[in-house]
Amino acid sequence: MAKLLDIPRKTLVGCNLREILLHPLLKRSTKRVILRLHKEMILKRNVYYEFQDKDGKHLLVSFTYGDQMNGDFLISVKDVSEYKQIEQTALQNDKLAMLGRIAAAIAHEIRNPLTSIRGFIQLLRPYLMQLGKEEYARIILTEIDRANDIIFEFLNSSKPSAPMKKSVSINRLVQEVILLTESEALMRNCDIQLETYENEDDLMVSIDVKQIKQVILNIVKNSIDAIESLQEARRGRIDLVVRSDGQFAEITLKDNGKGMDKATLARLFDPFFTTKEAGTGLGLSVSYRIIRNHGGSIRVDSTEGSGTSFVIYLPLAE
Ligand SMILES: Nc1ncnc2c1ncn2[C@@H]1O[C@H](COP(=O)(O)OP(=O)(O)O)[C@@H](O)[C@H]1O
Ligand SMILES: [Mg+2]
């Protein structure tokens, strides 16, 4: 309790609630928490109260009183952050399992009609040629092939199967993704910057290159969208930083786009959750799955109106 209140133990022993509240060393923010607790527990008679402290730790306060206690209260505080995290992951896993099933079903259903369309276009081709419109057939075929590719990619990444792993330099991979998106970003008024550390040039990770590229692309595209939908004249910026903590490669992607409110943050990784008119809401849920299949994790931090940062952790290759 002394640690929680950030007051030396000696000066706390024997204090009643009033004395604690008037304690000269008590921080104002802590005092506010105690007053809130007091309201919840003593006035409203709730036996449990959960809150997050300033470091983001989840604390569960339980409160006992009764006839045998002669009007005294027993208050205990427990750090339940780890439990919370496990609970969150379990929830996410359920959603992902559902996503996998729906996606596989939809993809399968779309593939069949695409195959017959493709076949009939090929049959029509000679007639189109006679009309001098062979170009139409070519466009239709490439577009169908593209749609097929997308479905294939998606099935690939939403399947729970183990990724096809290869040892690659994470810096080089990130650079390649930047090359892919740079022109689109510039066209839509954003600069992309990559910051790497010289000695970490050969930070190796064992990954499925296609899948991880897809994840980084998804996040960068979201950033570009978030910057574009901000109706301000500020220049968009996406900063990528690659570094390591010895065990994991850490890829940070930070944008100065519109950020997210709490409700969006809470549902971000849900399959089919989107706030965009033409969004699919699949980008982040697929990305989450891919990273988890690699034994890594993703973290998000966002401030409404000023920007968002995603951090991807991937285990370093042995
Ligand atoms: N960088 C970002 N800034 C603001 N909002 C974001 C960002 N990335 C994701 N989001 C929010 O998360 C939602 C889900 O993203 P995603 O799964 O990629 O689906 P989609 O891009 O199709 O909407 C987006 O609709 C958006 O509201
Ligand atoms: Mg997206």
Image: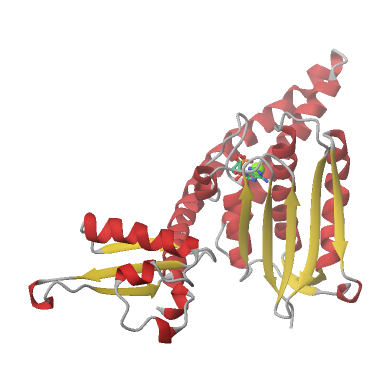
Residue at 49 percent of width and 75 percent of height: 6
Q: Is residue 100 left or right of residue 134?
A: left
- Please determine whether, in this image, residue 140 is positioned above or below residue 223: above
- The quadrant of the image that shows the C terminus is bottom right
| Image: 66 above or below 133 | below
Depth check, front residue: 162 or 220: 220
Task: Residue at the far left: name it.
Answer: 67
Q: Residue 13 placed where, x, y %?
A: 35, 84
User: Can you say whether 184 is above or below 192 in the image?
Assistant: above
Q: Where 53 sits versus 117, above or below? A: below
The colour scheme used here is secondary structure
- Please tell me which residue lies in front, 184 or 13: 13
Q: Does the image show residue 50?
A: yes
Residue reaching furthest bottom? 10
Q: Is residue 270 visible?
A: no
Give the residue displayed 12% in from the left and 71% down from the top: 66
In which quadrant of the rendered image does the N terminus lie? bottom left
Q: Considering depth in this image, is 233 or 125 the residue closer to the camera? A: 233
The spot of residue 290 in percent (x, y) is 62, 60
Ligand 1 quadrant assignment: top right
Q: Position of residue 237 (x, y in %)?
A: 81, 45
Which of 71 and 143 lies nearest the eye of the viewer?
71
Q: Residue at 86% of width from left, 34% of height from top?
A: 187
Q: Is residue 302 left or right of residue 186?
A: left
Kindly give the residue lying farthest to the top in the view shown.
131
Q: Which quadrant of the structure image shows residue 174?
A: bottom right
Q: Tag count in the figure?
A: 0
Q: Position of residue 213 (x, y in %)?
A: 75, 56
